[in-house]
Amino acid sequence: MKLFNYSLLAASLLAVGSVQANNVEIYGLAHLSLDRLDNGVDSGTNVSSNASRLGFRASTKLEGGLEAFVQLEQTIRIDEGAGSFADRDSFVGLRGDFGTVKIGQFDTPLKVLRGKVDQFGDRVGDIRNVGRVSGGAIGNVFDERFKNGVAYQSPTVNNLTFAFHYTPHNNTGATVDNLRESYSSSITYEQKGIYLAAAFERFEGTDGLNPQAIRLGAYYDVTDAIRLTTLWQSAKDIPGGDRHLYGVGASYKQGNYVWRGQVYQTDDNDTADSGATLFAVGVDRNFGRELVLYAVYGITSNDDNAAFRISAGGRGTQLPAIAGEDSTGLSLGIIYRF
């Protein structure tokens, strides 16, 4: 992380006693992997940039115990030399004793919950392979960022935190009828070694459907070395009919290594034999907080009428799934944080 102190410059330019400029932070993450992917019909070896990013944060102390803050974050496609400015979590806001309010484009409470319990976030075996669904004409729903969003997060009281996220027109331009109005909320209990959360999200659709989902998620540290994770989801009013997702995961720290695995199943919707089971195992080699090398093997076993992937969700390179065929992936990756 690189910090630049602009306090003296801001003071000389503004000369306002009630405002104190803090640090501007430049941060990023480079996540690349070499993947062998197979969808049951075709296979290939690919280099993939996985949610690699570059971001900027700044904050300013205000009178009355308030703090203003801003973040601009963009995807960096290191494998192909491409990217889009401010396409990730980007917002401006205020925080104080009342909690935090921000406006912009950023993760919903439902998405945040999944990220806390997913053993393979942005890797082969990510839960989103079987948990994210298509909302028809409005595209993917759940595990997405709301555009044009306004959010409130309460102060933490007795380890409990409430969050509410609203958009009057998600993924659209100017509106006069609030088309695609959507909201997401969660309540979270968190303390050392324990995380419990419930979230609800609803999208206004454009084809007679209003996709919505309930999620419950948790992790529990049995010891300092062993963590158990779980997630359950019920998705309704989506194309093809309602779906339920559930599964468990575990990780074990052994010195500089972390061994991890998870298994998740999505049930049939209105079509028979349309479910799938995802299974992934892997190991991380940590070199401090900044650098991680890892290996992952994952398989999504599709029923006859199911077509779920193993390499979707935060992944730069994917193979289309084939109905009734298993999707497999072997991935060797590197993550560098700064």
Image (tube, rainbow, N blue to C red):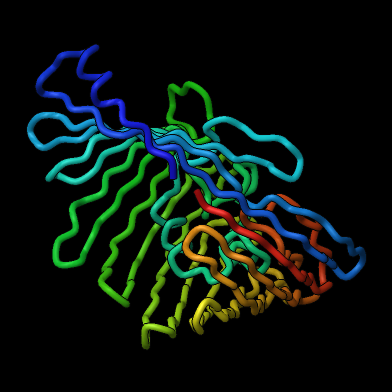
Asked whether the viewer can see residue 234, the reply is yes
Residue 62 image point, x, y percent? 15, 29
Image height of 233 relative to 137, above or below: below
Residue occupying image coordinates x 30% and y 26%: 6
Image height of 223 relative to 132, above or below: below
Asked whether the viewer can see residue 149, the reply is no
Outermost residue toward the bottom in this view: 222
Outermost residue toward the left in this view: 64
Please give left or right for residue 42 compared with residue 128 in the image: right
Residue 86 image point, x, y percent? 52, 32
User: Which quadrant would residue 37 be assigned to in this image?
Assistant: bottom right
Please give left or right for residue 9 compared with residue 155 in the image: right
Please give left or right for residue 74 compared with residue 22 in the image: right
User: Which quadrant would residue 11 be assigned to in this image?
Assistant: top left
Residue 281 image point, x, y percent? 64, 79
Residue occupying image coordinates x 29% and y 52%: 163
Image quarter in which the N terminus is found: top left
Outermost residue toward the right in this view: 41
In the image shown, does 269 or 100 lie closer to the viewer?
100
Residue occupying image coordinates x 46% and y 23%: 175
In the image shown, does 331 or 207 lie closer to the viewer?
331
Residue occupying image coordinates x 63% and y 45%: 139
